[in-house]
Amino acid sequence: MICRKFDPHKDITAAHRIWEETGWLELGSEESLELALEACGVWAAELAGEVECLVLTAPGTMRYLLQELPFTSVCAVVTGRAGRKQGLATFLTAQAVAEAALEGAKVVGLGMFEEGFYNRLGFGTGSYEHIIRFSPSRLITTVEYRPPKRLTVADYKEIHACRLERLKQHGCCSIFSPELTKAHMLEYKNGFGLGYYDGPEGDLSHHAWFSIEGPVEGGSYRVEWLSYQNWQQFLELLSVIQSLGDEVATISLVEPPGIQFQNFVHKPFMGRRISLSGNAEYQIEAHANWQMRLTDLPGCLEKTQLNGTEVHFNCKLNDPIEEYLDHNQKWRGIGGDYILTLGPRSGAKPGSDPKLPTLTASVDAFTRLWLGVLSASALSATRCLHGPPDLLSKLDAFYLPAPHPDWVI
């Protein structure tokens, strides 16, 4: 196996082949793929002289409470049919994570195809995302309807800028490249946007981007993302969604961070009973489909400010990614012995203090603890985190809101 950077002139045909073999490339979506390849850092793995695996990454930021941390998204990991079960995806993703860490990313995230695969590289599963399907006619709105402006792919730069300025909650991620926003817009069938230019310079302030599943009339729409800077703008976007109710049977969306969307649907349980087992059933599903891992423990804890009494402890951190890294790789993971402080002023330094209690954890479990996905006591049941009961109880006292990327990572 040869691992190297992607050559857009030599490897573009192989990229198309791999995307086609995995079913990710449909007729007419070639531009989306080529935009993504241009916008991302791309790693390639050769097997028997053929490129059989690609990993795409893109830099951005992640909100941790009130702080912004350098973040890298692993946007795609894709392997051709002749390269399966050879460890290409694991090895190549490990190299991409190491490269991101060397370039300054403190956290790396990705969308997973299945639980367990990326855990071997230290990635921990994130919070559940709620997918809501409802009739737009049943939305409760309190804002008077204003006709929105129509948005198309040609407006991608304004749309991307609007997304970067959106209201961010804990765990929210933003990717820097506007071309990746354009690539995602081109992926969605019959995509369109509706929004308002209420910014101080007449710029786009809030909008929604939709895709259509099935027939345009009477079909199902999906909100691919909502972007707003305050809750009043959010309510106005709800009125836009409600305005589609005369024509659209159902709309689905990922629940925005910080709210319970059910509060904005009239008689949600009645609606579900009426639609039960129909073609347009109203429902709420939950999926934990993203993962993250720390790549710089001292750098992340330096930005961690938690309410409560400081807790000091040793941490024995196991990072499995080291097994998959080339021996010449400068970044070798973050495993080792640390003295940690969590509280209003947090920190990490190498070493061990025999007077302090010791927490033993894998990087995936510690990342989940740091993000607030699960408590220390709950993670101890996963057999990936261990510590004295008194230490676990003290760590449980730190409360963090559930993290949500609010972006396809």
Image (tube, rainbow, N blue to C red):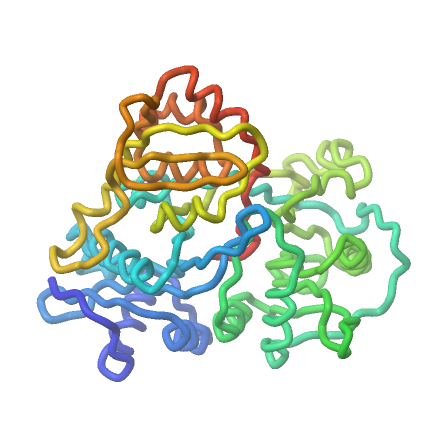
View extreme (top): residue = 389
Residue 360 or residue 285, whichever sits in front: 360
Res. 227 image quadrant: bottom right
Name above or below for residue 323 compared with residue 5.
Answer: above
Q: Which residue does the image show at 49% across and 64% down from the upper left?
A: 175
At x 39% / y 68%, what residue is drawn?
A: 25
x%, y% of residue 5? 23, 72
Front residue of this view, candidates 395 and 200:
395
Where is residue 329 shown, x and y percent of the image? 17, 59
Q: Position of residue 87 (x, y in %)?
A: 18, 51
The residue closer to the viewer here, 337 or 187, is: 337
In what quadrant of the picture does the N terminus appear? bottom left
Q: Residue furthest left?
A: 48
At horizontal 64% and vertical 65% (from top left) the residue drawn is 165
* Relative side of 214 to 318, left or right: right
| 15 to the left or right of 86 | right
From this viewpoint, is residue 187 visible?
A: yes
Q: How many marks?
A: 0
In the rendered view, tell whether residue 378 sits above or below residue 145.
Answer: above
Q: Is residue 256 above or below residue 127?
A: below
The answer to whether any part of residue 246 appears in the image is no
State the residue lying farthest toward the right: 144
336 over 5 or under it: above or below: above
Which residue shows up at 56% across the image and 67% down it? Answer: 189
The quarter holding residue 309 reads top right
The percent position of residue 370, horizontal first and vertical second, equals 45, 38
Left or right: where 250 falls relative to 125: right
> Between residues 249 and 378, which one lies in front from this camera angle?
378
Report the side of 10 relative to 104 (left or right).
Answer: left
Place residue 206 in its image quadrant: bottom right
